[in-house]
Each structure stands twice: as C-alpha cells, then as structure tokens.
Image: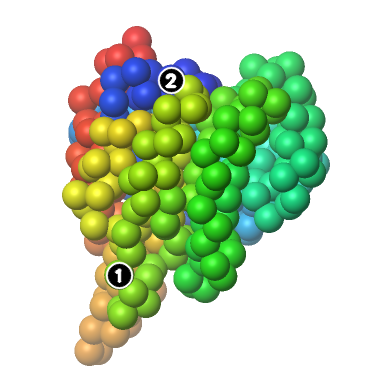
Amino acid sequence: MLITGKVMLDIAKQNKFAVPAFNAGSGQLLPAVIEAAEETNAPFMMAIHPDELSFLGDSYIAQVHAAIQETKVPIALHLDHGASFEQVIHAIQLGFTSVMFDGSHLPFEENIRITKKVVEAAHAVGVSVEAELGTIGDTGNSIEGGATEIIFTNPKDAKEFVERTGVDSLAIAIGTSHGIYPKDYDPHLRFDILEEITELVDIPLVLHGGSSNPDDEISKSVEMGIAKINISSDIKIVFSNKLREILNESGSEVREPNVMFPACMEETKRVAIEKINLFKANQKADLYK
Ligand SMILES: [Zn+2]
C-alpha cells in the first residue's frame, strides 16, 4: 500500500515509534525489506538515493511501485538526499510520495529559499518533503556522504526553518554520521539538543546515520520524538559479508544469481527485522488502515 511521507510520519510521531527508511537500492534488497515488514506487520519508507536511482535506472521505480501495490504493509516511496530542485521534480514525476531536499551544506538563507521552493512544488501534487538542518557526519564509506565535522542543529534555527519553509519533517544533527564509525570512535547522541528541538518544533524529526549508535540511545531518541531513522549501511554490510563468504568458499564455482543471493537477502531481512523491532515499528501497520 503506497502512502505519503507525511501520513507515514505523523502517525509514527503520534504513536511514539520511528519508521525505518531502508535504502534498498537493488532488486535483491527490495524483496528482503518488504518481507521483513510483512513478517513484523510494520510500515516503512523505501528510500532511494539519487546515486542509486541513476545506477538502477528510472524503470526500476515501476518495479518498486508494483511491489508496493502487491503488499498490504504501508510504504512511502522516498527520495533520499535530493541535491537539487531538478532531482526532486524528477522523483515526483516518477511517482515518489516523499522527497528529501538536503540543503544542509548551504548557507541558512539559501537552504530556506530552495527548500521553500521544493515544498511549494511538492505540496501542489500531494508529495511530502523532508529537509535537513545542521550537518550529519561522514565516515567516508557511505553513498550518502555528509560533512567531515558534525555541525549540531541549532534548536532556534530549526524552529525558524520549519516555520518559514512549511516542510513536513526535518533531519537534525545530534551526533550521528553516515556509514560505519571507525573502531576507535565512541558515538553518543546529544539528548540535550534533541530535547530543546522537540520543545520548539512540532513536526516529525528524522535521524540519519544511526547505524552504529548504541541501541539504548536509539530507543531513547525514539521515545523523545524521532519519527524516522534511515538505515542503509547496516542492511548492506551483512548482505555483502554473506556474499563474500559464499564466493570465497573453497572450490566455489557459484555463478547463478538465484543461487548466490538468497542467503544474502536473508541476512538483510534479519537485520531489517531487528531495526523494525528496535524502533517499535512492529505491529504498527494497522494504524494506517
Ligand atoms: Zn542521510
């Protein structure tokens, strides 16, 4: 069942759970995350990054739409990190129901100007918009990128940004980075900043790059008002580790995709279910009926 990002996240915020946004940028990852959602009766956002879209080609979106129509769980089709007005319009034309415009690297006024333009265009056709303020870190091993240094979201700026742009949800920087953290790095979330933002801003808040933050911190952030958490690296690492294992097996001459991939897809599905349960999104699909 296809729904908009706004409906998806408003219900999550009201019911104090977070929707996982899975970057399922291949024909193998898509059924794995849908099966995970079906088995846990969970809603989720199917996120596709512009780099994934250019790799897959526009025709992949027709396959995604067909898969969404076939399943009963609610799914929003979301453009992850749209970098320009043009990319957002392209996604809307393809039938995305939610788009992110990421102007977090731009000066504040410029971020507001373009986000506002995106909101006007997207809302005219019933598509929801996520924006970003502050910068998510970058560990250098993810497609989403980010900044070398995290700039924490200023709560007062967040309030002004939301009021002036009319955006539906906001990605904030409270101490997460895209990708997987180096072994010697100990990530912690700034709950003081999150608390201040939730006091000033009433729309659903989004966490990017929460792959390796401790589970108890993620749970706490959900209780405090995070309504969407992006998951990309976590579901891809286990897939590729399994694939490497299968290809490296001694004497392995495996070459058929339908022989190589099923065990890898099971790994992705297992981790997707873990995240759904951690975010308390399990058994929440019925709230969307
Ligand atoms: Zn991101």
The image position of residue 282, as x and y in percent, is 22, 31
Badge 2: few (under 14), some or many (20 or more) residues near its Cα, within 10 Å? Answer: some
Q: Is ligand 1 closer than 8 angstroms to the Cβ of mark 2?
A: no
Q: Amino acid at mark 1?
A: Asp
x 75%, y 50%: residue:
107
Extreme residue in the top direction? 289
The image position of residue 262, as x and y in percent, is 29, 58
- Image quadrant in which the N terminus is located: top left
On screen, residue 4 above or below 36: above
| Side of 180 relative to 107 (left or right) | left
Nearer to us in this view, 24 or 65: 24
The image position of residue 81, as x and y in percent, is 61, 48
x 31%, y 80%: residue:
184
Q: Amino acid at mark 2?
A: Asp
x 75%, y 30%: residue:
116
Please indicate, yes or no, whether residue 100 appears anywhere in the rendered image. Answer: no
* Residue at the spot of label 1: 186
Nearer to us in this view, 176 or 39: 176
Q: Quadrant of residue 266?
A: bottom left
Upstream in the sequence, badge 1 or badge 2? 2
| Side of 68 relative to 111 (left or right) | left
Q: Which mark is residue 103?
A: none
x 32%, y 59%: residue:
188
Q: CA distance from mark 1 to mark 2?
A: 32 Å
| Side of 64 relative to 198 (left or right) | right
On screen, residue 46 above or below 254: above
On screen, residue 148 above or below 42: below
* Residue at the spot of label 2: 10
